Amino acid sequence: MTTTAPAATVTSLDDAPVTSFHRRLMYRCAGGPFLDGYVLSIVSVAVAGMTDDLHLSVFMLSAIGAAALVGILVGAAVFGPITDKIGREVMYILDVVVLVGASLLSAFAATSWQVLVLRFVIGLAIGADYPIATSLLAEWLPRQNRGRMLGALIVFWYVGATAAYVVGLAIIHFGGDDLWRWILVSSAIPGVVVLLMRIGTPESPRWLVQRDRRDAARQVISKVFGDTVDADAAVAAEVIAAGNPEQRASLRTVFRGRNLRRITFCGLFFLCQVTPLFAIYTFGPVILQAFGLNEGVMAYVGSALISLLFLIGCVPALRWVDSWGRRPLIVWSFGLMAIPLAVLGIAPTAPIVVIVICFCLYALFSGGPNVLDWTYPSELFPTEVRATAIGISTGISRIGAAVGTFLLPVSLDEIGVGPTMLIGAALTVVGFVACLAWAEETKDTNLGGTAPVHAG
């Protein structure tokens, strides 16, 4: 009788084979970025009807546009450390429940302040989800596919943003601008889908080891991988990497030694990337109209096209992040991103086809930083402060995004579209310099150990 040799057993989570569990987990975690892209973009479609119905001033319009970003800042900064303390599993569900509830309440918003508060609460839930879901996914993924699968999360951000424009335009087409409340409420539908998908997701074994819950870590590894991964050996490897579980890392750990440079790098490149990007997303139709695309529907269509190209730009970056490496991808991307923004600033009266091409090129070149937004902090920081670091870097980025989104309508009104685009180009150049100076190569990093430092 012929027997089949058993599959080789690996002894660490970093070397585990990619399974259907990893793919399911990626889709579950991707629900957060999808909802982020959706809720931040859907408000730009609702702006016209909301402005007329609630008689919004420029100040209140800017505040509503920035409210979700401020919420993301607070949610990421506050719930990152909480997630490192109490675990990923519970928070992973609760934040989506809050988002669905706040979205449904938008149907009853009668004043601008009510809209403002609800947008802040929605942002709070999204901000909390980033350190929760990203840490959970990173801690389950093997190193050979970690960059690609973490980077894929941003693809779902753009899918969500594009879906928001499609849904919003469909509601306007069939119902009119006065249905702006229902445009905002539509965020609850994908929120419920994400919530149902996430039920039953297991806790991170790496976090369990950090909390000295080794038996629970062995059980969850065995349940997920069966005999493919030696649970005892994998837990033993994580124990060695974790050190003394009684010596808990604190928030100060993120701001000490080389971690200070790393968190500065992550926050700075993230800030310089998303400040112009979120302003374009939130007020895309307004910006295109300022450039001369005066037909309202065409401005929305142009914004949807640019959103789609942001998504397309991530495709080659996802191929290169594991083969080419993190450092060259982010350095070259930032350098190329600055060029079309500079052209838009120098030649704001160029033909509309040139304007649209520049926006499209910016969208395509942004793929590199987009796929590295959560890959870098996930690989640069150890398990005990990983969610904290992701939360802080995300929070720093949203400071710039909130300020940029708040000031963009004022900037267009006060100094014009050309100088506004030049400010975006200057920020992108700052990001390029930061990446050139501080970007490390973390490809093939063992997540249970210390990230290698290869600063080109």
Image (cartoon, rainbow, N blue to C red):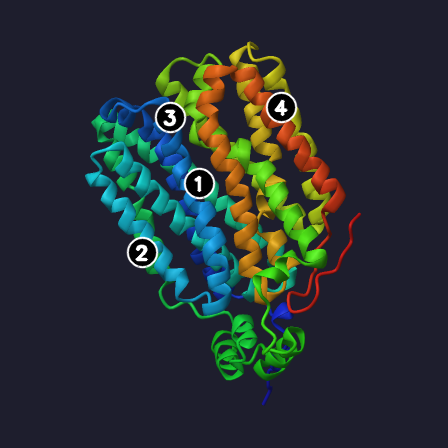
Residue type at the position of mark 1: Leu
| Residue indicated by mark 1 | 69
What is the crowding at mark 1: few (fewer than 14 residues within 10 Å), some, or many (at least 20)? many
Distance CA(mark 4)–CA(mark 1): 25 Å
- Which structural element holds mark 3? helix
Quadrant the N terminus occupies: bottom right
- Which structural element holds mark 4? helix
Q: Give the mark toward the camera: 2 or 3.
A: 3
Q: Give yes or no for contact between labels 2 and 3 (Cβ–Cβ under 8 Å).
A: no
Please indicate, yes or no, whether residue 285 appears anywhere in the rendered image: yes
Specify the label residue 340 is tagged with: 4
Distance CA(mark 2)–CA(mark 4): 40 Å
Q: Give yes or no for contact between labels 4 and 3 (Cβ–Cβ under 8 Å).
A: no
What is the crowding at mark 3: few (fewer than 14 residues within 10 Å), some, or many (at least 20)? few
* Residue 55 sits above or below residue 397 on the image: above
Q: Position of residue 22 (x, y in %)?
A: 51, 63
Residue type at the position of mark 2: Val
* Mark 4 or mark 1: whose residue is earlier in sequence: 1
- Which structural element holds mark 2? helix
